[in-house]
Structure formats: structure tokens, C-alpha cells
Amino acid sequence: MKNFFSQVFDFSRRNPVLVISLAIILVMGGVSYYLWTRQRELTAQHDEVKRSGEDMLQSLTSHARITAEINSVSQALAFIDKNLVNEGDLAENLGYFYQIENNAHIRFTGLSQLSSQPGPADAPYKTVPFSLRATGTYRQIIRLLHELETGPRLLRVKTFSITGSDTAEDVVTMDLNVELLAKP
Amino acid sequence: MPGFNRLSKRGLLIELNPYQVLVAGITRLDETPLVIDCAAEFDRYDDDGLQQWLTANFEKQTAWLPVVAGFVPPDALLQRESIVSRRLVEPDYLQNLVKDQYKIDHPESWKLATLSQLEGLPLAAEGTQRPALIAGVSHSDIHDVQQRLLDHRMLPYRLELGTLPLLGVIFDHKNRRNDKRAVVVVNIEQEHTVAYILGKEGVHTSGAVRHGFASIVQAARKEFGLTDAAAVRDRLHLADEELLLRATKFVRAIGRDLKPLVDSYEMTTGQPVGEIYCAYLPPPLAWITEPLAQVVGRTPFVIDCAEWMPGVNLQAAEGVAPFGPHWLGALSLIADLPGPKIEPAPKPDDVHQGPWHIDCRLSAQLPSGDLIRRKFIGNVVAASIAACVLILAFWQLYVSGSLRSEIQYWQDQVATHKRQFAELNLATKTLDAKVARLDAAYDLMGAPYHVSDLLLNFGRTRLPKMSILSINGFAGGVVVRGTLQEPSEQAAQTLKHYVEDLRKDPAIGPLFSAIVLTSLERAEGADTLTFEIACKLKGAPAT
């Protein structure tokens, strides 16, 4: 063994460039291999943290838009909530239609609140159906419909029927089935 | 000089003998005569002095310095022996011979060669029993000398057993003087003395004399009453009258054993022995030759190197001090002796490089020209690969560092914006909840059209001769019934165009997936058609 080391030392003394180069190749090769394996882990970690960081920053840029949307939606919901009908408050409900009637200068020949269908338990809203009948000129009927559809209460026309009168040329009769948005 | 044919640069002559290291610079190794432009002598172990001299005289020498080297190892074998020359082709013949005759345990670790005892030429492997000289040096001795030379950046182009060329030049000198008497060449080693008798039958060797230079030192110590080795050495180097008067006593031990050998030679061969030459003795010890010659009963061999050198194609440059007789061994290495040459001319790696010249190099352990080139290329390749690996490693270090910095940057970004991100998530959840409520309201109240607008649009598109009797709306669409007061054929075309116009109308057409005329009845006795147009809402289920 001593002889072997002596020969190695002797060889090293005669070939310093070769021996130093080989030592560098061995040491740095090992270091490179270690770094290469470590680098794959680092790259994966880097990709993950970069992706999450970029996603976060990208999301933060939409903060102002989301805030504005919340405001808009909140206003809309406030308006909706303010004009919800209460199914049990018949007088108030029919009163709304009478108010429309006055604005349109036409009288309902038939107006009744119908029973609502039960909705899902967690539904934020429900609908209350109404049946309406009115007779008037074409212009009056159009105005009545316009008042109903653009009034503060949210209303949907389920069915309608407009029929001309057999006796008077300019008189039409309108039958409506509508639903108003109501508190659950 | 076979080894120098391709050399045109400056070289060196070096002899490592038992007492000294002799070195001489040669201007050009391929010219004739060889010009020696500098020379120096060093103590046997004075490596520092040798290195300084080399640095001073060969400072421009950046590569290997080519040298012709001679060395005289104490254990070297040089014996006259009777051999069967045709058996020289047998690989083990010479090894077995020296193993049996000279008790060499591992002859395979020796460099062995045979040469004729008269001309110093290599022996042909033919013929029967004949006398020859067997020269041999152990590989370990050769290795030590080679390594010592390499340590001084000297590359041996020949490494010779120094005694052989010395015998050659003495033979030549004797022949030039036409001296018929034999000459005794004595090499006084530390513990023994070797004698070679050069006569008309060539080199004659005898057993070693048991006394060497140590016997002279011992005698001097006793004679002068000195105890310190350095003091004895200094005293022996001071050749004053007192020392010369007692010199015979100092060499008596050697001479007493040497004389019978010489006398025996004379009696055996009938040839008188005239002179005795003590090889390698440095000038301070040159006085030993004369008393030893007296004890043996012969005269000292005298040679003037300055006169001898031109005859062997050697020349000393101006300013170089005259060479003493102790330089004869060193100069014999490059002396161009007349006489028979080796045919064909030897190759650089051959053992026999000329008469009396045997190359003992272990070529495999030397950086030969090819080896130097290979070594250079190997170094370049290894250094290049090392540089690449180094660059790769540092690049990976850089990349790893960059990745770590990037990871840290993104982690900092995430940490910095964590609170804002939590607020954003909360806002998003709030928005989602509110939008869900809004969607629920839309699902319940959303309508494809305003009835009032639809009625107005139907009224707007009504034809002049058309009366609308009824308009019914339901979940699936709208049905319009009416009459058209036109002749049937014209009315059919008019209604067809009317339906097409409804489909194209931007306020009505986009609401419905289909607008079709579903009924057309003609009234009895009048140009009136009753019609029914069905408009199917988009997304309505098929009926």
C-alpha cells in the first residue's frame, strides 16, 4: 500500500497538469452531478412558486374591477330587495296594480292574486302569480303593459291574450297572467 | 553520434561517477567536432549546485534538456566470461548465466548486454564458445539515475555504463601510442576496488579487490590521529609533502591485493603490464595514482586531454578551462573513436549505440519525444475537459443561485401580497354570493321580450289591408291571427312576403327561431283570407 501511494505521489509530481486536471474533473464532475440533480428539484419548486405568484399578481390586478362589480351587484340587489312583494300582504299587492291602473288611465275588469307554487327551501326569492283582465283602446292597453313591465316591482308576463272586440273597432281586451318577484 | 542525428539544439554531457558529477555544455549536438562551451564539476551529492549551474547556463531551456549521460553504479556487472554466442538468441541464456556465475538473484530485473572484449562491438548470435564481456546494471540503479536526471529537467538520449567507453578510449589511446604493454584501469569504490586490464587479448577482468577508498580513509585517520570524518576528508584533499610522504601507507591495502592480480595476468598471458590508471579520481585525490602504481610496481598512466580531444572530434570553446585526466570518463561518452563501426547504424532505441557504448535507458520510464507529445496532448485534453467541467459546474452553480433568488423573490411576492390576496378572495366570494342571488332573480323574472314592445312592433309591421284579430303569448311563443282583404292569390303572396318581412325585422326576427304561416282560410263570397302566424321562441321546447 505504501508503495502504491509512493508511486501515485511520484506520478503526480511528474504530471502535475494531468493530475490536477483529473482531480478537477472528478471533484467538479461530482459537484456538477449533485447540482444537476438538485437543480431539477429547484426548477420544479421554482415553477410552482412562480406560477402561484403570477396567478396571485394577476388576480390582484382585477381587485378594482371586482370591487366595482360588487358595488353594481349590490345596488341591483338593493333595488330588487326594496321592491319585493310579500305574498301575504294582498292589499299592498293589489294596491300596486291599482296604482298602475291610475297611471295608465284604464281599469282592470279582472284582478286576482293566485296561489304561489312552493320553491326550494334555500331559494332567495319566489314568485307570486296574478291574473289580470283589462279592456280598452289599443293605445291604453300598450300603455298599461308598458307601466307593468317598467314599474318598480319585478314582473314577468307568463301568458297574454289580446283580442279585438266584435262590437267596437278600436277596443281590445287583454288577459294577462303575470308573476311578481316576492320574498320567500 | 547516432542519438543526436536529429538534434540541432544545445545539449549536455554528464557523468555521475563515484566521486563527482561532471557536466559540460555542448553547443550543437549534430555538429562535428562537438564543441564544449562550458563545464563544471560538483560533489557527488551537490544537486543544488548542479541546478544553479544548469539555470545559469541553460536558462533559455524551457523544455527537456537532451543529455548524454554516463554513470558508474557500485553494483554494476562488467566481467569477461566464456559464452556460447549462438545461444544468445535464447531469452534466458544470459540471465541464467549471470545468475549462476555472479549470484544475481533476479537477473530479469537487470539490463544485460554482451560485447566483444577486444573491439567493444556487439556479439553476433553465432559460433561456439568464445570470450566476451558481459555488462549489466540493475533496473533500480538505472531508475534512480534516470529519475535524478529528470528531476533536473534533463532527458537522457543515452545513458551508458561509464566504465565501457572509458576502456574504449584507453584502448584507442594505447593503440595510437603503439604501446604493446597492458594498462590497468582501476576504479576505487568506497568499499572495494575493481580492476580491468587492457591487453592485446582485450579487456581482462578479475575478482574485486576487497579494499576501497574507505581503507585509505582508515589508514589516514590512524596515521594523522584524526577522529572526525570531515577532518580526514579535508586532510586527504590537501596533498602536501607530508601526505605524499605517507601516501604509500594509505594505498597499501589496495595495492597489496591488486598486485597479485596484475602479476597473475602477466604470468598467464605473458604480456607485460606497463601503466595503471585510476579512474574518476577528482584533482584533490589525484595523488593516489602514483603511490598505488608504486605499490603495484607499475607507472601511472598519463594522458593530456587537450592533446587527445582533437583526435576524437572534440573541441573546447575559448574560455573553457583545460580538462584534467579525471574528465577522460566523461569525454569518452562523446568521443568519436576510429575503428570499426556498427553496421547498420543503430537506431536510437538500440542497446548497442557504437563500440564500447551500451545504452542502459529504461525507455518506458522516460518521456520520449512521442511520449512528450502524447503527454502534451493528454495534458491539453485533460485540461480542456477540466475547464469544461469547471465551467459547467460554475454555470450550474450560477443557475442554482439564480433559481434560489427567483424562488426567494416569488416567495417574498406571495408573502407581501398575502393579505391583499385574502381580501380579494373574500371579495370574490361576496361577489359570487350576490351574483348567485341576482341570477336567481333573473331565472325567475327574465323574459325574452317586453310584451308592450312586441305589440308595438307587430302593429308597426301590419299591412294596410290587414286586420289583427288576436295575439296570444305563452311560454313557447306567440300566435297572431288576422284577416287580409285581398284576392286569394295576391293575399297568399302578400302573406308570404309579410312572414318573410317579419323574419327579417330586426325587432321581431331575432326573438324567434321560427316564424311560419300555419293557417290560411278563404271566407265565402268575399276577397278576404283569414290567417294564423305562429312564432316559436328561441330555446322553447319543441311541440
Image (cartoon, coloured by chain):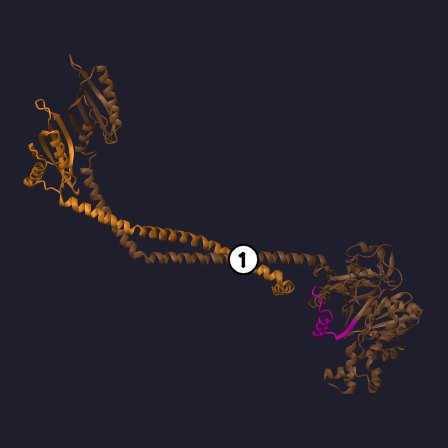
Check the picture and name the quadrant holding the C terminus of chain B.
top left
The quadrant holding residue B330 is: bottom right
Q: Position of residue B79 (x, y in %)?
A: 82, 65
Residue B54 located within the stretch drawn in magenta: yes
In the displayed structure, B419 sits above or below A160; it is below
Q: Position of residue B530 (x, y in %)?
A: 17, 19
Query: Which of the chains is orange?
Result: A
Secondary structure of the residue carrying numbered label 1:
helix
**B100 or B115, nearer to the observer:** B115
Q: Is residue B459 left or right of residue B221?
A: left
In the displayed structure, B87 sits above or below B321; it is above
Query: Which of the chains is brown?
Result: B
Q: What span is in magenta? A: B38-63
Q: Position of residue B97 (x, y in %)?
A: 79, 60
The quadrant holding residue A156 is: top left
Identified by mark 1, the residue type is: Ile
Give the chain letter at badge 1.
B
Q: Is residue B293 left or right of residue A138?
A: right
Q: Report the residue marked by disc 1.
A: B391
From where the camera sits, is residue B261 visible?
no
The quadrant holding residue B100 is: bottom right
Residue A131 located within the stretch drawn in magenta: no
Q: Position of residue B137 (x, y in %)?
A: 76, 65
**B269 or B386, nearer to the observer:** B386
Q: How many marks?
A: 1
In the displayed structure, B526 sits above or below B395; it is above
Most distant residue in the top direction: B525
Instruction: Give the class, few, some or many, for how many residues have Cα within 10 Å of label 1's Cα (few <14, many ≥20).
Output: some
Q: Is residue B63 left or right of residue A73?
A: right
